[in-house]
Image: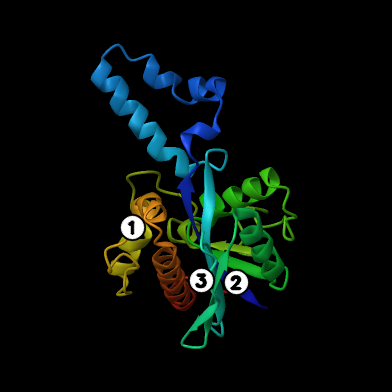
């Protein structure tokens, strides 16, 4: 079966896109703090989290690869448009004018795949793109990706598999680690090895570094493919 590995990058929407009632709701917890310094610190922390929520953030990049061929596509927002190009002939970089176009292009690709592989896609990537697509009225071609949690078809979430469905909770033997930590543990080059992390995306968008974001997102996907192969070889249950 054709399997697609993908990862998304997100950034916060501007604060001025939210009306006063929405802003009051978002910062209510901070405004209830009596200390002005603590209040401001909490407001800043909440605003940094905007990129994690699909009603306050946007998708700025989606990188995807075919598991078997490692051919794929990276869709990314670029204000200046730009031309499509290829990395080593295997991966096409496609600049998109806006988020709706990016998501529509993604769903066009997704419908040609039987299943997907992600790292924390069940907890983040899939619900994020589902809700952003709904907000922007973009047709979703695959609505079965959350499915039944305790199966790997059509969605194999490696974080679920490597924690054995969170069997240990926060502090047990199978506790959750981030992708960077798993990569280093299994001898895979970390996508963060070139100094970019998910925390940098908002700043990089503001600086117009959309291509650098796309390349970072693709490194995440390559690392996920490598981790998936290790999981298949060493841990996947016999079918």
Give the percent coordinates (x, y) of residue 20.
Answer: 53, 21
Front position among marks 3 and 1: 1
SS class, disc 1: loop
Looking at this view, is 149 or 107 the one in front? 107
- The image shows residue 114, relative to residue 102, as above or below, that is below
Q: Which residue is mark 3?
A: 236
Q: Quadrant of the C terminus?
A: bottom right
SS class, disc 3: loop
| Mark-to-mark CA distance, 2 and 3 | 18 Å
Q: Is residue 5 visible?
A: yes
Give the percent coordinates (x, y) of residue 67.
Answer: 55, 78
| Mark-to-mark CA distance, 3 and 1 | 29 Å
Q: Residue furthest front?
A: 80
In the image, 31: left or right of 140? left
In the image, 39: left or right of 116? left
In this rendering, the count of numbered labels is 3
Label disc, if present, on residue 78 of the rendered structure: none
Give the percent coordinates (x, y) of residue 82.
Answer: 52, 70
Question: How is the structure coloured here?
Answer: rainbow
Looking at this view, is 237 or 87 the one in front? 87
């Amino acid at each position: 079966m054709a399997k697609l590995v993908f990862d998304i990058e997100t950034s916060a929407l501007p604060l001025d896109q939210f009306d006063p009632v929405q802003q009051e709701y978002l910062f209510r917890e901070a405004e209830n703090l009596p200390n002005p310094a603590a209040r401001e610190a909490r407001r800043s922390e909440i605003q940094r989290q905007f990129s994690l929520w699909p009603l306050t953030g946007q998708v700025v990049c989606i990188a995807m690869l075919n598991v078997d061929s490692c051919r794929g596509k990276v869709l990314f927002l670029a204000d200046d448009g730009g031309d499509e190009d290829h990395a080593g002939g295997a991966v096409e970089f496609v600049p998109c004018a806006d988020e709706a176009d990016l998501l529509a292009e993604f769903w066009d690709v997704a419908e040609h795949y039987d299943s997907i592989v992600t790292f924390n896609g069940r907890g983040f990537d899939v619900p994020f793109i589902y809700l952003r697509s709904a907000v922007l009225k973009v047709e979703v071609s695959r609505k079965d990706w959350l499915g039944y949690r305790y199966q790997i078809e059509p969605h194999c979430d490696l974080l679920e598999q490597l924690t054995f469905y969170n069997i240990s909770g926060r502090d047990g033997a199978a506790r959750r680690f981030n992708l960077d930590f798993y990569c280093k543990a299994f001898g895979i080059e970390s996508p963060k090895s070139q100094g970019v992390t998910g925390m940098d995306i908002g700043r990089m968008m503001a600086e117009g570094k959309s291509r650098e974001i796309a390349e970072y997102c693709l490194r995440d996907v390559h690392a996920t493919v490598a981790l998936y192969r290790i999981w298949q070889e060493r841990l996947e249950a016999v079918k």
